Amino acid sequence: MTIKEKTLSSTDPELAKFFSRIGESFLEMGQYSQALEYYEADLKFKEKSLPSNHLDLAKCYTNMGLVYREMGDFSKALSFFETALAIRQKSLPPTHPDIQKSIENIDFVKNKL
């Protein structure tokens, strides 16, 4: 356990930000299993602390989808991308760029299936 994990309570939103940033770093380095580990921790934290339609959850699902896409697991990536899109469609106007990006992610992995 890192110093940051020890000093933050399990309900501190800073802990989720920490998990997300570390996951992003591992994803950028191509270390997908480590990225997945931190993104999963971020998702679990946010699932416990946020309403199911919160946009931060959509970002978590997108991050998980990105890792699975890079790992070549397109069916899992599709599932995460579709969940992210569903949340965004409930919370954002149809022309919002995040909705368009979600659709692009879905189209990409569908073409790989």
Image (cartoon, grey):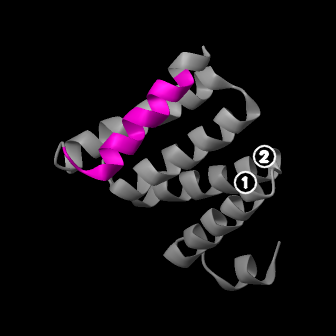
Question: Where's residue 71, x and y in %?
Answer: 75, 34
Q: Does the magenta stretch include residue 101?
A: yes
Whether residue 12 can be seen here: no
Of residues 28 and 90, the one nearer the viewer is 28
Image height of 81 relative to 30, above or below? above
Query: Mark 1 sits on what residue?
Result: 27
**Three-letter amino acid code at the position of disc 2:** Tyr
Query: Mark 2 sits on what residue?
Result: 32
Verify CB contact (< 8 Å) between mark 2 and mark 1.
yes
Marks 2 and 1, the one that precedes in the sequence: 1
**Three-letter amino acid code at the position of disc 1:** Leu
Q: Which residue lies furthest to the left in this view?
A: 93
Of residues 19 and 21, the one nearer the viewer is 21
For disc 2, the neighbor class at 10 Å (few under 14, some 14 to 19, many from 20) is many
Tell me the magenta residue range.
95-109
Question: Where's residue 51, x and y in %?
Answer: 33, 53
**Which disc is residue 3 wearing?**
none
Badge 1 marks a residue whose secondary structure is helix
The answer to whether 49 appears left or right of 20 in the picture is: left
The answer to whether 92 appears left or right of 55 in the picture is: left
Q: Does the magenta stretch include residue 96?
A: yes
Seen at 60% across and 13% down, the residue is 113
Q: Quadrant of residue 4?
A: bottom right
Q: In which quarter of the image is residue 56?
A: bottom left
Image height of 11 relative to 103, above or below? below
Question: Where's residue 3, x and y in %?
Answer: 79, 84
The answer to whether 57 appears left or right of 21 in the picture is: left
